[in-house]
Image: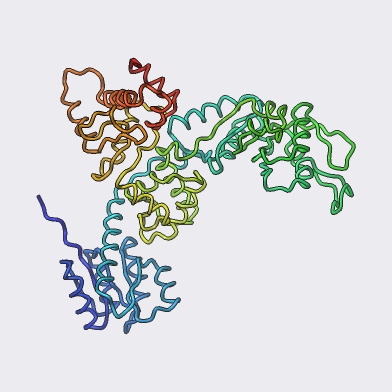
Amino acid sequence: MSEAKVPSILVIDDDAEVRYSLGRVLSSKKYQVQEAGSGEAGVAAVKKGPAPDLIFLDVRMGGMSGIEALQHIRAANPRQLVILMTAFGTAQTAIEAMKYGAFDYIMKPFDPAKVLALAENALKAHADMRSAGDYKPTINADDYREGIVGASPVMQDVFKVIGQVTASDVTVMITGESGTGKELVARSIWKHSHRAKGNFIAVNCAAIPDNLIESELFGHEKGSFTGATNQRIGKFELCDRGTIFLDEIGDMALATQTKILRVLQQGEIQRVGGTDTIKVDVRIIAATNKDLESMVKAKTFREDLYYRLNVVRIKMPPLRERREDIPQIVDFCLQNLVKQKKARVSKVAPEAMAYLCRYDWPGNVRELENLVYRSAVIAQGDAILVKDLPPEVQALGAASQGVMSVPPVSGAGPAAAVNAVAAVATEPAAVVALGAPAGDQDFAAQTKSEPAVLTVSQALDFLHKELTKDTETEPVLERLEREMIVRTLKALDGNLARTAERLGMTRATLRKRVDELGLQQG
């Protein structure tokens, strides 16, 4: 077995004593330390190569300054990690250091413990960047002009419904949490319909005060109310022969709901303060993150309007229920940022991607998009690393390294079931909540209030043993999935609902897999 490469560190400072003392500190950890006595010499050493794993660079030197040297070094090697050293911790120094891509900066005189901790963090970041070097995008962003990204079974179902409703003018209700992409779905329906040549106008009903919403939607006549100094054409008139998207329709006042119902039933509107009836040919697509059924029962939403809007429903799943789509969404965001020249980062280190896949994303896709943008902007190399992620994502990812749940497996095909294990197989300490036994304990005897677990090593051992059974005809992935389902059903006394929840799938999907695998429920 070959020995691990000793990290190399270049110290650039025109003070020989600083180079000596810093070199002694770093050498105590067996780092290979090189020295350069000026900015010019340091830049020349980097360009000549081989590039060091890390550079400590003084800010104030005779001749080329540290900031100038940093710019030359980063131009020669954008992935080079540089820690600036300064005795003057001014705001300008800090801002310029980060502006030109320094990994960090440290104050003189040095605390040896802080120097070593900073070097260790930087070298880990260097290793993460190298691991991202072979990163290949999972998609081509140009193939996703709709802006809706996802290959998970649940998203494929969404795409199918979109295709089915584009051929008609049927009213569509899109439900789901905020940030799941409801407006993207509405735009896709419009774009592929015969109304694509007409206007598409999105109206956020929650953002417009009740006393202005009718004027916004239907227009008003001059003098119809205080401030109405001119006639105004409303969104419905502007959308004639087009499509209007009423977002957050659950926040619409009952009086306005009545007028929306009239548009749906008779295809006509009246401007506020007007007497003339105006015919409009508009397709309505509505969306909400509220429970309209409960609102109907509470009489805060009109029942007749609900049924008029809810002809076809498309439910957008939250991101936490389609974690397998996260790498594709991240790729899509990064490619668009690079294309728009908003960021230079085009890669994600594998560890950082794993952290992203563990996070629950309460803000859904919108939150993920914002996070990718933020992380790409502050990343110092050509890849997003764990250190570039927000503290809440880092904290959850680090905590999940001990025990983590497998991402929900929508569709739960045989490959999908084991992909969940493979997703964390690189983390020896991980424990996967799969509803399989821990150690040699009897599975049915375990406490039902706690998830049974299968360690990664046990899962891999199971796979190895199954692969050696040449007499078996059933694919090994199906055998593992069968084992997971059978044992979990047994532990939970055949309760389908609880078993589905434990395995991270819907009850309908579990019932389908039970039938497909020929399992008998006791």
Q: Give residue 64's position: percent from left, percent from top.
A: 33, 79
Whether 6 is drawn above or below 217: the answer is: below
Q: Position of residue 41 (x, y in %)?
A: 25, 76
Using residue 192 as the reference point, say whether residue 252 is left or right of it: right
Quadrant in the picture for residue 417: top left
For this orientation, the residue located farthest to the left is 1
At a point 20% along the width and 71% down the height, the residue shown is 26
Q: Is residue 47 visible?
A: no
Question: Image quadrant of residue 287?
Answer: top right
Seen in the picture, residue 212 relative to 278 is either above or below; the reply is: below
Where residue 45 appears, as percent x and y from the top left, is: 24, 71
Between 461 and 56, the residue placed more toward the observer is 461
Residue pictured at 56% horizontal, 43% vertical: 178
252 to 67, vertically: above or below: above
| In the foreground, 503 or 307 | 503
Relative to residue 383, is residue 308 drawn left or right? right
Residue 171 appearing in the image: yes
Left or right of 192 in this view: 476 = left
Q: How many numbered callouts?
A: 0
Q: Image quadrant for the C terminus?
A: top left
User: Is residue 433 or residue 240 the one in the foreground?
Assistant: 433
Q: Position of residue 263 (x, y in %)?
A: 77, 31
> Which residue is depicted at the point 85% across and 51% down?
228
Colour scheme in the image? rainbow
Please identify the quarter of the rendering in which residue 308 is found. Answer: top right
